[in-house]
Image: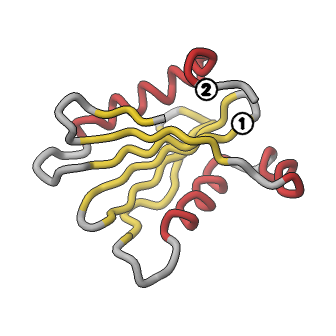
Amino acid sequence: MYLIKNDGDAVMVLQEIRASASAKTSLSEENVCVLGNLSMQNKLGAEDNDRRVLRLPSPVGDCNNCCAYVYSENALLRRVVVFRVKGRIFELELRQNSESRPLSSVIEAQTFFVRSLMRGGEQKIIPVN
């Protein structure tokens, strides 16, 4: 799912991280920041790309089930929050589309959206498989 800021300066992308059947059990017991590290490694890919880690995965405030990291891609910032909702693992990536607007201007919206999903708002947004 994509959420686009009204002026187009930022986009939030919500996606579920789906594990293989063999990894599902072990990942369900992992600390969410371990999952954040896996997500980050997946995003960074090969070493010869234009992506650079700016902040390693760390807990978001007082939230035990969410972890955030920041990287840059082609000089634009990306902030990813990895979190759990009812045993499912998700990431919400906030993408800066313009250097003219600081990413900090929309981080609060990203955090609010994650917390609303964790409080039960996912019933309206995330389809049940």
Residue drawn 37% across and 70% down?
52
Q: Which residue is mark 2?
A: 126
Viewer-proximal residue, 41 or 128? 128
Q: Are marks 1 and 2 in contact (CB under 8 Å)?
A: yes
Residue 85 as seen in the image, left or right of residue 20:
left
Which residue is denoted by mark 1 in the rendering? 88
Residue 100, percent from left and from top: 10, 49
Question: Residue 55: x and y, percent?
Answer: 41, 60
Q: According to the image, what is the colour scheme of the structure?
A: secondary structure
Which is nearer the eye, 78 or 5?
5
- In the picture, the quarter occupied by the C terminus is top right
Q: Residue at x 50, y 38 (%)?
A: 14
What residue appears at the point 57 percent right and 65 percent down from the top-left corner?
42
Q: CA distance from mark 1 to mark 2?
A: 10 Å
Location of residue 90 in the rendering, given as x and y in whole percent from the top left corner: 60, 40
Classify mark 2: residues with Cα within 10 Å, few (<14), some (14-19) or many (20+).
Answer: some
Question: Residue at image x 67%, y 41%?
Answer: 89
* Mark 2: amino acid: Ile
Circle nearer the viewer, 1 or 2:
2
Viewer-side residue, 108 vs 48: 48
Residue 41 placement: quadrant: bottom right
